[in-house]
Image (cartoon, rainbow, N blue to C red):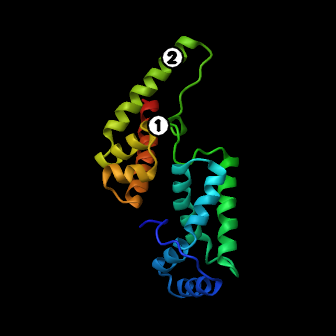
Amino acid sequence: MSWFSNSKKTDQADDQKLLKQYLETGDLHLLGELFRTHSSMVYYVCYRYFQDTEKSKDAVMQIFEELIKKVGKQEIRQFASWLYVLSKNYCLMQLRSGKKMQHVSIDEFVEFPVNQHQEEDHEEKEKALTALEACIKALPDRQKQSIDLFFLSEKCYKEIVELTGFSLNEVKSYIQNGKRNLKICMEKSREE
């Protein structure tokens, strides 16, 4: 599904009608339609903060996930204004937290020991990297492929979808499960 196609100007009544239908039925297709009509605005808000096309496109997907969580929890009088604020807040939170969103370092979930002596430190890092390599090799193929593209090749979700043919949800799932499996594997290797 492309968020950026068919972005047409809607009026508040159309928004409220779709929102009401979604809240009554829980049909995500309706929420997707509603979001799609405002996706260009969401993208430009993200681009203003991130100054990066791919990060902004990934952020649009993340904001849709935020929307799913938050849309039923408060009364929304003007959907476009509410979505604008949600998008702006999301971007600000990403910047404040220092997250790089989709491009993250493998160091994020692999702790390298820090020693006072440089030689020991270097040896410990070598052991940790060797263990990490073994842990990555032990992952199921789809997790391994997704983890490799995401962390080592620094590809964003969309690029991984295009390269692998996996769906966006599959990519997210493989990365999440792969990270969890790597953490477990690395913890075991540290205990040995």
**Where on the picture, by quarter, is residue 87?**
bottom right
**Element type at mark 1:** helix
Residue 53 tag number? none
Q: Residue at x 54, y 66 (%)?
A: 64
Amino acid beneath label 2? His
Residue under pointer 2? 122
Q: Looking at the image, is mark 1 or mark 2 earlier in the sequence?
A: 2
Residue 187 tag number? 1
**Where on the picture, by quarter, is residue 121?**
top right
Q: Residue at x 60, y 82 (%)?
A: 15
Q: Position of residue 133 (x, y in %)?
A: 37, 31
In the rendered view, tell whether residue 26 sits above or below residue 166.
below
Mark 2 surroundings within 10 Å by alpha-carbon count, few (fewer than 14), some (14 through 19), many (20 or more): some
Q: Split into 4 quadrants, where in the image is the C terminus? A: top left
Q: How many marks?
A: 2
Mark 1 surroundings within 10 Å by alpha-carbon count, few (fewer than 14), some (14 through 19), many (20 or more): some
